[in-house]
Amino acid sequence: MNNRIKEFCKTVVSFNNHKDLLMYLFNLVKGNSNATMPTIPDILDKKTFNVFLVEFAKHNSKEITMHFIDLVYKAGHCLSTLKHNVTLTLEDFMVDDDIKQEYKAVLKQQTKIVDKDLVLKRYLEKAKENLKQRNSTILDIIQSGARSSDTQLRQIILSRGMLDTGFNTEFVEGCYFDGLSIHDFEISSLAARKALYDKTMSTAKPGYLTRQLVYALSHIYIDSEDCGTKEYMPYKITQDNYKSFYGKYYFDIETNTEKVMHNPEQFINKIVPVRSPFLCKSQNVCRKCIGEYYYDFKHVGIITAQTIGERATQLTLRVFHTGSAVSLQSDIMDIVKQYPDYIDLHDRIITVKQEAELILPPDTIISKNTNIILHDVEVMLQYSDGTVIRFTIMQGSKLLVQPGKVKGNIIQLIPLSITNAIVAIENFLKMKLSIENLNQLLKIQTILYKLITYDSPFPYFMYELLLLSQLTNQNNKPFYYNRKLEFPLIKQPLKNMPMLLGIGLLFENPRKALRYMIQNKDGIIANSPLKKLLYL
Ligand SMILES: [Zn+2]
């Protein structure tokens, strides 16, 4: 190790709190420049550190930011090897016996899976408190965001909890620390097999999704700098979506000019005129209607398809780390407890016990063939005695009856596993819709936003391009050519991929596949120059 690095490591290790350390690193970076340091969060974990870095990047130049991040990274290496070299032992998972016994006793009193899950959640907090007193390192690891989660911790120290076996949801009382009973083991093996099956089946899905998206979007690229359009989309910027608007051009009424949105948070709850590919006058799409970003690229369509596809892959993979453990929407469970005579929840199915009127908001969008609700919806149940129950169900839930007078099973909830997010996206892509006016278009944009955004939002142009690529005019021409917002617009289902590539795989060779196609479609390609090219 050379002396400079040795010196750096020594200094880094000598600090006792992160604030001093970060200030030290900052001063190394600063030099003679006028760099500024944002407020350092009191607790530094993965989340707060990300927020801090975004602030840092806003206030300082690209070079200084990169240099700073580089130093933080090096300091991290020093700390994790020289100072906080964390190890795990069995003792890190040991919870006091009296807490465990109390938990088991309370658990025995419950008959419903849902209630058992609530007890588990309550006692997990107690157990964590206990681990904290025992100075367990596992809590630090979870809190820092480096590894593991509460779901995994509870499976080790208390109960494996609710498991989806593929047939139904079961509660496994045993935990990994104490070992599983034969019954628990059997349920766990079913759940594990389901997880394996899901993994095999679902990893292929986002792959195909990506390919379909690339197919649909690949022809959209930037072909000019500024189309000069004077039309703007009236986008409402909200607490949920403002992050997507970084870099978008908007029309500033006060100065009568177009500006780049650098601080979209100041527009929250306002309707802003924004440049959009929907109204671009360019033959393909111009750079200004897309927006201004750090990166410089031309093929925005492919980038969009890749980005959305990649996120979908990540979402599927994330499900598997918890080994098929399920959690249910706790707000509905609370309501079921409040109105035991009116409503029930069992195996993810909501049942109405007395006849009631089921009311959904008028603009609810339901997939026609599968009865799946494509966005979060507030459901209302009106009983003849005047009782009204309201609750929100999540996108992807299935409607078992038509709205109106209902009794018995009405809605099947989805388990909160992310695989369903992909199913929801797929349903959206398969859907055919007629868009009658601008309001509907904006509403569908909002739904699309919720469907695809999971952790962090994409730049807004990606949502726009995805919808844009699937719209046609009345005369069935892609809306994408000669864009004019003339309604109705039809959202077409995303087509399946052309067969050629599939057959190519069948023959292990695209040339053989082409030959096959030619032989079976006499005359079409058979006499073309392509034939010579392929030495047929
Ligand atoms: Zn344009």
Image: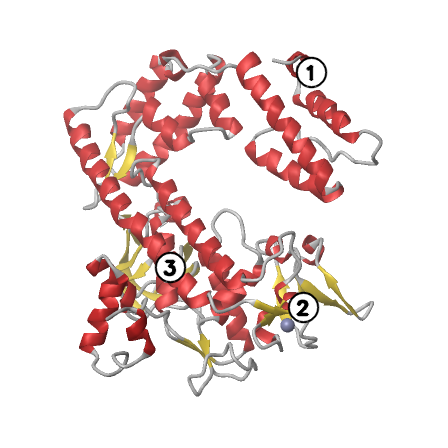
Residue on which disc 1 sits: 4
Residue type at tag 1:
Arg
Instruction: Give how far across and how far down residue 286 sits, in percent.
Output: 62, 69
Q: Quadrant of the C terminus?
A: bottom left
User: Where is ligand 1, by quadrant?
Assistant: bottom right
Q: Residue at x 35, y 65 (%)?
A: 358
Where, by quadrant of the figure, is residue 162 drawn? top left
Which numbered disc flags the more N-terminal residue, 1 or 2? 1
Q: Are marks 3 and 2 in contact (CB under 8 Å)?
A: no
Judge whether residue 240 can be spotted in this image.
yes
Amino acid type, label 2: Glu
**In the image, is residue 64 above or below residue 378?**
above
Q: Of helix, strand and loop, which one carries label 3?
A: helix
Residue at 31% over, 40% down = 114
Which residue is identified by label 2? Answer: 225
Residue 197 image point, x, y percent: 22, 44
Task: Quickly name the residue at label 3.
Answer: 211
Q: Amino acid at mark 3?
A: Arg
Return the disc, 3 or 2, that comes first in the chain's sequence: 3
Residue 485 coordinates in the image, percent (x, y): 56, 81
Which numbered disc, 1 or 3, marks the residue closer to the eye? 1
Estimate the spatial distance between the alpha carbons at disc 3 and disc 2, rounded to whole Å.
28 Å
Q: Is residue 416 left or right of residue 446?
A: left
